[in-house]
Image (cartoon, rainbow, N blue to C red):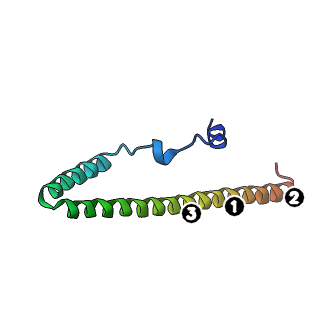
Amino acid sequence: MILEAIYNGDFYPSETVVPKSEKYRNALRACEKIMDQLAQRLTKEDYDLVETLLDQSSIAQCEESECHFKVGFSAGLLVQQEAIEQLKIMDYIHTEQGVL
């Protein structure tokens, strides 16, 4: 049950869910190929710098994804709240008009 997993601290979708799309797999393969080429062409110091760049870029992308998730999740809750309010209004109108 999702609520139990969240409560118990066992819910880690960012660590356990991996995209299964072909686009994702192709991008990973392309990155590996480019990194292999860079490893052959660059000095160790330059290659280490590229790895540091990738690490920092990954951190920035994770932060961006977290922000997008929070905004999207919050927007979803607001939509749900608004829909419930609309149903309450409709129920009130129907009750006032004697419609069930």
User: Mark 2 and mark 1: span between their CA atoms?
Assistant: 21 Å
Secondary element at image label 1: helix
- Give the class, few, some or many, for how many residues have Cα within 10 Å of label 2's Cα (few <14, many ≥20): few
Mark nearest the camera among 2 and 3 is: 3
Give the residue pinned by disc 3.
71
Question: Residue 81 vs residue 15: left or right?
Answer: right
Corner quadrant of residue 70: bottom right
Question: Residue 2 vs residue 15: left or right?
Answer: right
Quadrant including the N terminus: top right
Q: Nearer the viewer, residue 40 or 2?
A: 40
x, y percentage for residue 79?
64, 59
Above or below, 2 against 52 in this view is: above
Residue occupying the point 36% across, 43% down = 20
Identified by mark 1, the residue type is Glu
Secondary element at image label 3: helix
Above or below, 4 against 38 in this view is: above
- Give the class, few, some or many, for how many residues have Cα within 10 Å of label 3's Cα (few <14, many ≥20): few
Give the residue pinned by disc 1.
82
In the picture as drawn, the residue positioned furthest to the top comes out as 1
User: Mark 1 and mark 3: span between their CA atoms?
Assistant: 16 Å
Mark nearest the camera among 2 and 1 is: 1
Secondary element at image label 2: helix
User: Mark 2 and mark 3: span between their CA atoms?
Assistant: 37 Å
Residue occupying the point 87% across, 58% down = 96
Question: Residue 72 vs residue 44: left or right?
Answer: right
Identified by mark 3, the residue type is Val
In the picture as drawn, the residue positioned furthest to the left comes out as 41
x, y percentage for residue 40?
13, 55
- Residue 17's mark? none
Give the residue pinned by disc 2.
96
